Image: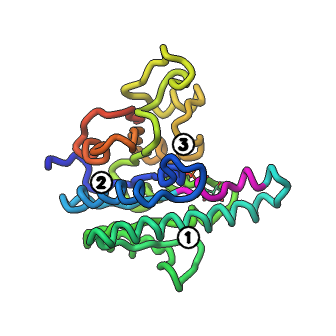
Amino acid sequence: MGVTYRRILLKLSGEALMGELSYGIDPAVVNGIAEEVSEIAESGVQIAIVVGGGNIFRGVKGAAAGMDRATADYIGMIATVMNAMTLQDALEQMGVQTRVQTAIAMQEVAEPYIRRRAMRHLEKGRVVVFGAGSGNPFFTTDTTAALRAAEIGADVLFKATKVDGVYDSDPTKNPAAKRFQSLTYSHVLTNDLKVMDSTAISLCKDNDIPIIVFDLSVRGNVRRAVMGESIGTIVGG
Ligand code: UDP
């Protein structure tokens, strides 16, 4: 296939693995995602994935319930490792070599995050899944995705979500909501549009990493995005 992007950073929210469930992981949904990833990995595209943990635990929620925020965030980061390992399992069952690297060392289950090693895996055609976020509390996995994308020199950041792009108002509440084809980083930041948090957008802006927001539940969308088809909203300079 005629690919536009050679090295991509795919950000999957924890909720993307949840499907219709209200908590945790739906194996059928994970398999669907793994199939899409496997298809593009076979075509030679280098894929790194940052996975969230919102399907299991969110630091902000823990803090709202009275927990120490940093402790709650560490629990959230550990939750992302469960998701990372689940994805690895699904991918490897499909024959895709996959490595999980975690920002908090847990060497019995995954490699520690080592940038150069991650890049070597990618060059060898292995999918790399980054777990444990950035390793720092008070951050998000969206920011981690922007950070890792910059670190590994990704051509693009794919922000896979449940909606087919960025709208001027909430499309689930306003039937007249308009979808943007493209946006600038500055527009997103000034208007506080819900693409990713502002730290993540700023990092992408400073490092010229385009962000493509698209609906993951539509089969074939990851491939379409890799081929440069206009399937959602692109945020750029
Ligand atoms: N988290 C963190 N530092 C990071 C990344 C994540 O503390 O660098 C914690 C934070 O508590 C967050 C949780 O991990 O709520 C799960 O990540 P996130 O909410 O970004 O997941 P998503 O919304 O993508 O499912």
Residue 52: x and y in percent read 54, 56
Q: CA distance from mark 2 to mark 3?
A: 29 Å
Dominant secondary structure of the magenta stretch? Answer: loop
Image side of residue 140 versus residue 153, left or right: right
Q: Secondary structure at mark 3?
A: helix
Q: Which residues are magenta?
A: 52-62
Q: Is residue 8 above or below residue 84?
A: above
Considering the numbered disc 1 on the image, is that residue within a helix, a strand or a loop? loop
Residue at position x 57%, y 22% from top? 173
- Find numbered disc 2 in the image and state the secondary structure of the residue it sits on: helix
Report x, y in % for residue 172.
53, 25
Q: Amino acid at mark 2?
A: Glu
Q: Quadrant of ligand 1?
A: bottom right
Q: Are marks 1 and 3 in contact (CB under 8 Å)?
A: no
The residue beneath circle 3 is 202
Please say if the residues under marks 2 and 1 sit with CB atoms less than 8 Å apart: no
The answer to whether residue 142 shows anywhere in this view is: no
Residue lying furthest right: 66
Crowding at label 3, few (<14), some or many (≥20) Cα neighbours within 10 Å? some
Q: Amino acid at mark 3?
A: Ser
Which residue, given by chain and number where applicable, does mark 2 sit on?
36
Residue farthest left in this picture: 1
Q: Quadrant of residue 197?
A: top right
- Of badges 1 and 3, the one in the foreground is 1
Q: Quadrant of residue 202?
A: top right
Residue 103 numbered tag: 1
Nearest-to-viewer mark from 2 and 1: 2
Where in the figure is residue 36, as x and y percent of width and height? Answer: 30, 54
Pointer 1 or 3: first along the chain: 1
> Furthest-top residue in view?
176
**Which callout, 2 or 3, points to the residue nearer the camera?**
2
